[in-house]
Image (spheres, coloured by chain):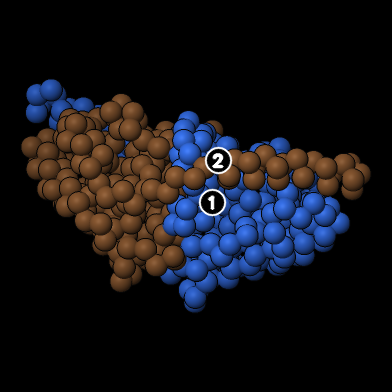
Chain colours: A brown, B blue
Amino acid sequence: MSDEMHARRMQKKKDVVDGRIARATEERGVLILLKGNGKGKSSSAFGTLARSLGHGQKGAVIQFIKGRRETGEYRFFREYPNLDWHIMGHGFTWETQNREQDIEAAQAAWAVAEGLLKDPAYQLIVFDEMSYMFKYGYLDPEPVVAALQQRPRHQSVIITGRTMAQPLQEIADTISVVQDERHAFRGGVKAQAGIEF
Amino acid sequence: MSDEMHARRMQKKKDVVDGRIARATEERGVLILLKGNGKGKSSSAFGTLARSLGHGQKGAVIQFIKGRRETGEYRFFREYPNLDWHIMGHGFTWETQNREQDIEAAQAAWAVAEGLLKDPAYQLIVFDEMSYMFKYGYLDPEPVVAALQQRPRHQSVIITGRTMAQPLQEIADTISVVQDERHAFRGGVKAQAGIEF
């Protein structure tokens, strides 16, 4: 490609991007859903959290599923002053096989979540792996949708999980589907610190 | 669902997961590609970086495309002691429209990247938005593939960008495709600090 053609191509792209920027004028918090079976949903939420904290915003995380190990993200973020990090009461649902205990833990986590959604001090809230709560019937989506709709106008929320409940999808501003095209795990590589947890 | 059915279902899931874990035994660094047009690729890389740093690992980031503003992720991570953060020389390619200057900046960034890929001290390296370098012909994928293949065995690398060069896809361990199902920007919401940058 000639330099001139390149310059024309880039100018055209710039015009398209500038036009889009001019049309997007609303300033408010957004609801972002990260769904699908691919790797990178929770880490994407934590990366956005870093971005938000970098701008001096106050954040909160509720992890609705607790792994067996202390995660790198928890170790990294837990001391951060402008951030609350909550982990739901016990291990993976398929580790515990106790429905009653799971429901209790989910309800307790939701009680904390509801409080955050009423507090205008929080600019970004992450509900990590929340979708399992709906899938297994531990939480009802309706009160969650109501609380999300009534949250402070500038507050953004990110919800992650493989299968997202339909009522949440209806009110979301942004939905990204992370698809698994290939995964090292299926190639025989062990889950490892710093990558998977 | 009865409690007994639930317990059986969870036990079955646990067996499947445990079986997979038992079969994945190799311990080595992985090459992860995050591609597609959806929101969340770079933030996913930065979230994984937080995870890795949380385990005391040493990391590095090269951002191959520089925005017009100082990003939240840069503000958040730049002071972190165990991490190097490099930003390629100048603004968005479609902002500059100068092919020669872009190629120079890309080559300089690649020189830094190549050094990192030879240094066993780094456990996780992020090449953010690198895919544009191949798309616009600023970098040739072949030497990049060669350097990736010769990197220290325990070193993991994450490369992000919309369209990924084919030679990189051939050697990747994990590929996630982030698809845009909905985006607040198209709904008229302005790009905002803490979410988009």
Q: Residue at x 38, y 44 (%)?
A: A30
Crowd band around label 2 with a 10 angstrom C-alpha radius: few (<14), some (14–19), many (20+): some
When asked about the image quadrant of residue B63, the answer is: bottom right
SS of the residue at dot 1?
helix
Three-letter code for the amino acid on which mark 1 is drawn: Ser
- Rendering coords of residue B69 (x, y %): 58, 62
SS of the residue at dot 2?
helix
User: Can residue B16 be seen in the rendering of this structure?
Assistant: no
Q: Residue at x 25, y 46 (%)?
A: A151
What separation in Å lies between label 2 and label 1 (alpha carbons)? 24 Å
Per the rendering, the mark at residue A23 is 2
- Rendering coords of residue A105 (x, y %): 13, 46
User: Can you say whether B118 is above or below B140 in the image?
Assistant: below
Q: Chain of mark 1?
A: B
- The residue indicated by pointer 1 is B42
Three-letter code for the amino acid on which mark 2 is drawn: Arg
